[in-house]
Image (tube, helix red, strand yellow):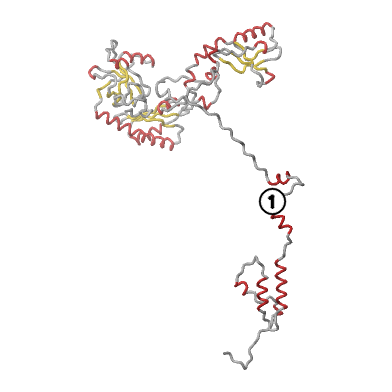
Amino acid sequence: MSCSGCSSGGSCGSSGCGKSGGCASGGCNRLNTFDWLAALDIHDPYESELVEVSFKNGSTKSFYTNPPHTRATSGDWVVVDTGNGFDVGRISLSGDLVNLQLKKKNIKKDTVFNNVLRKANERDLQRMQEAREKEPEIMVKSRVISRSLKLEMKVCDVELQADHRKATFLYTADGRVDFRELIKHFASEFKVKVEMRQIGARQEAARIGGIGSCGRELCCSTWLSDFKSVSTTAARYQNLAINQSKLSGQCGRLKCCLNYELDVYLDALEDFPEKADKIQTQAGPAILVKTDVFKKIMFYVNEREQGRGKFYPLAVVQVKEIIAGMKAGKLVESLDEVQIATIVNEDEVEKDYEDVTGFVELPAEKRKKKKKKKPRDSREQSTPKDKPTSTTNAPEQRRQDTPRVNTRQENTRQDNTLQDNTNDTGTVSGNDHANRGSNQNPNRPNNPKHRQGRKFHGKPGNRPPRDKPEQGDKKE
C-alpha cells in the first residue's frame, strides 16, 4: 500500500503502513516530518494550539490553529479554512514539535493563522480525490494556452482546492513574465480563481522527484527543504574535475550534495600554506599540480617540463620550509633532495590472492594462432625458378602446348569441299551429307532444325536452277 503521490511506486520495502496514504516510516511522503511523540503515545507536556497540515502528500505545508472541539491529532484528515474556501489535508505535526518547526522556518508565533474546521468525512475525501484527478488535464490545457500567447514560461504543476474554487499554477521562467492576459484566459477556461506562483528549477525537481546519480531518491524530494547556493568553488576545494555533466543534477543546476562535505575540506585546508602554487629552486621553478587534502601531501612538477615530467611529492611542513627559505633568499638545489618517499602503511599493503569463492579456477587455454594465407602473387614470387611449378598449373600448361584449331576455318574448308562434290542437278550425295554431319563442330549442339536450315552453302549467284515441269506434263 502506497500513497497516491508516492515517487517510489510503493517499493519502499514495507508491505503497507495502514495510515491511509501517510507512512509513519517516512517512505511515501515527500518532505515529511515524523511526529515521534505521537507514535510513542506519550502525553506532551508542552501542548500547542498550532498544527502543521500537509497537502498533496507533502508538496505543500501550512500551519493552522487547531481548536479543542475538533479533537484532531497527528495523522487525521481535516478540513481547513484557506480564506478562499476550504481544503482537505492531513495533520503531520502537533504539540511542541510545531514550535521547533516554526523556529526552523523563521515564522513568528504572533502571526495570524487560519483555523481547522473539523475532521474530514468520506464526502470531503471524495471531492479531494476528484480535484486530484482534474489537475493533469488542467495542467496540459494551461500549457497550450501559455504557448499560444507566446510566453516564455513553463507550467510545472497545478494545485486545485478540494472545493474546486481556486487553482494555484506553479511555473518556472528565466525572467519576469507578464501574465495578465494569461490569467484572464485561465479564469474563463477553468471557471476558478487563479493564483500564479513562480518557483525555481530546484523546487520543480523536488515536486517531480526522481533517482539521483548515487542511486537513491532525490534529496530535495525527500528531506531537503532549504536550498543553499552552490558554486564551482565547492568542487575546486574538493579537487573535483569541473565537468558540467557530472556536477549537475536533474534540475540542471549544480548538485546540492557538493555542500555536504565542504566544511570538512575547508577545515583540512587550514593547515596548508597560502600562495604555494609556485615555488623556486636552484634547478628552476616548480608548479603545484595536485593536492591530497587528507594525507597532507602536495605534488609539484618542474615548470620547464610543462607538467609532463616527474611528480615530486612534498609534505606540507616541507613546503612551508621552502617558502620560508625563499623569503630568506635560500633556495633548495632541486626537489629530488627534499621529496618524500612514498609512504606505505601496513594496512594499505596489497595482500596476495585468497580463494574466497571455494572454486578451482583453471588456467586459460593456450590457443594456436592460425597462419594467414599469403596472396597468390606473393606465392609465385616466393617460388624459386629452379623448382618445378606445382601440379595445379599442369592443365594450363597442357592447354598452352596443344595447338589451337580454328573451328571456323575448318567449317569453311568443309563447305568448299561439299560444293565441289555437288552434281550437275545441284543435289548433294548422301555420303557427302554423312561426311559433313560427322565433320561438324563438336561444340555446336546437334539440332535437326539447325541442319535443315543449311541445305545449300553456295553463293546466291551460283545457285543451280530448279527442275521445272514441261507444259505438256500434268501433275498427278
| Mark 1 element type | helix
Residue type at mark 1 is Thr
Q: Position of residue 246 (x, y in %)?
A: 52, 26
Observer-nearest residue: 42 or 190?
42
Q: Position of residue 175 (x, y in %)?
A: 47, 28
Res 472 quadrant in image: bottom right
Q: Position of residue 76 (x, y in %)?
A: 27, 22
Q: Position of residue 174 (x, y in %)?
A: 48, 28
Observer-nearest residue: 322 or 337?
337
x 55%, y 16%: residue:
349
Q: Residue furthest right?
A: 386
- Up the image or down, 406 lies above or below 217; here it is below
Quadrant where the N terminus lies?
top left
x 60%, y 72%: residue:
448
On the image, numbered disc 1 is attached to which residue?
391
Can residue 87 be spotted in the picture? no
Res 308 quadrant in image: top right
Q: Residue furthest left?
A: 69
Quadrant where the C terminus lies?
bottom right
x 61%, y 69%: residue:
446
Can residue 124 be spotted in the picture? yes
Using residue 191 as the reference point, say whether residue 418 is left or right of it.
Answer: right
Using residue 151 as the reference point, say whether residue 460 is left or right of it.
Answer: right
Mark 1 neighbour class, 10 Å CA radius: few under 14, some 14 to 19, many 20 or more: few
Observer-nearest residue: 333 or 169?
333
